[in-house]
Amino acid sequence: MGKANFKFAGICALGLALANVLVAWGEGLPIRDPDGVAVPTYIRLPAILLVAWLLDVVPRAVGRIGPHLRNPWPTFRDVVRERWTREHVVFAVSGLGAWYVCYAAFRNLKSYVPFVRGKNNVYDAKLDKIDKFLWMGHDPAHVLHTWFGTNVAASFFSFIYIAWIVLIPVTLAIALVWTRHPAAGSWFVTAVAVDWVLGVSTYFVLPTLGPIYSSPQVFAPLRHTYVTGLENSLLRERTEVLAGPHATHAVQTIAAFPSLHVGMMVTVCLFVTWAGMPRWIRLTSWVFLVLTVLATIYLGWHFFVDTVAGGLLGAAAVWISAMATGNHVGRRPQLVDQGSYDKPAPGTKPSSSLIRRA
């Protein structure tokens, strides 16, 4: 039976948290709840967990109760006992803890980059030159605007960008709450943690803003979308934080190199491929990766070279996490044990595979 292995994710969480404290102390900066301006974490996180738990339990209970509503409470209780064994509770809570510490420290460290490296010390001009060299003298974003237009395509790529924001929490919910295959879940959660470690480290090495902020005139013709408002909001928060980090509860989140949108999608794509998931999941993931690359360049979030670096980072993260969690044969990533600790319902046979291969 596969076992959860959050040791390396815990090391990542501890390392990022320690770096967070040391940088904050050294630079005299506050440590913030990264999403606490609208809804505090102590309210938001339990609410998310409750919704995920209900989605895991209620449909199964309703399916067993049937239209006549016979024995609803005993049936609901049986489903909870089957789905939420002690092993799974420990798995979900420990994985969530490692994930959130990594996430919160990552967001704070990202906010500290301008103070450590200098507010005006950015490499956008150099990356812009590299982009134009690779694209034979053309601006990649302008080329995409010419190909796809600046109206309907702007709305479509805005949708893709927002869909990515929703996708990552959903994949984490699947890996921690809905899965009953701890080896796979811990591999994926660890990969996301490694993405954050590698990503924030690179932000400090090569600080950038992104084309939408360094060359806004290129993106002025685009139709106004939700992403336009988001870009303006992030710039406003950056201005507030740089003006007085102790006077605002916001964190600054602008950093282009590398693209973690692309990096995490590469992590997802390689994970579902190496974990042997059905063909439709693999194909959908790779298609969404291509659309994510196009969206981030088209909308101005990233330079082309950012997406290349993000892809390499995402591949490194899923490989490192495979080695760290024991999901490998030699140096080749592979889900080596597809066991499950799912408790079978009465009269059914236990599951022995991660997911039926297509």
Image: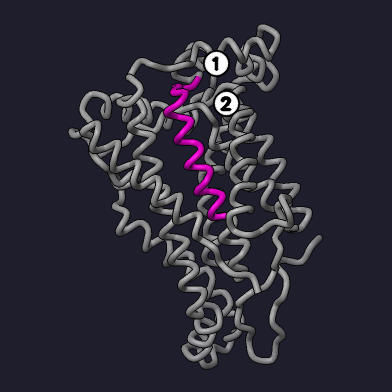
Point out residue 47 in the picture as x, y percentages from the top left corner: 38, 62
The region drawn magenta spans 188-210
Above or below residue 169? Residue 342 is below
- Quadrant of the image for the C terminus? bottom right
Q: Magenta: predominant secondary structure element?
A: helix
N-term mark: 1 or 2: 1
Q: Quadrant of residue 116?
A: top left
Residue furthest front as drawn? 330
In the drawing, what numbered circle is on residue 186?
none
Label 2 is placed on what type of residue?
Asp
89, 140: nearer the viewer: 89
- The residue identified by callout 1 is 127
Residue where numbered disc 2 is placed = 306
Q: Is residue 113 above or below residue 185?
A: above
Given residues 98 and 357, the one toward you in this image is 98
CB under 8 Å between callouts 1 and 2? yes
Colouring rule applied to residues: one colour
Separation (CA) of disc 1 from disc 2:
8 Å
x, y percent for residue 282: 73, 50
Q: Name the secondary structure under disc 2.
A: helix
Depicted 248 relative to depicted 328: above or below: above
| Figure quadrant of the N terminus | bottom right
Q: Is residue 287 left or right of residue 248?
A: right
* 265 lies left or right of 136: left
Residue ID at (43%, 64%): 49
Give the residue drawn at x 70%, y 52%. 333
Q: Residue furthest left?
A: 247
Is residue 281 shown to the viewer in this render?
Answer: no
- The part of the image, by quadrant, that contains residue 48 is bottom left
Image coordinates of residue 217 in percent, x first then y, are 49, 11
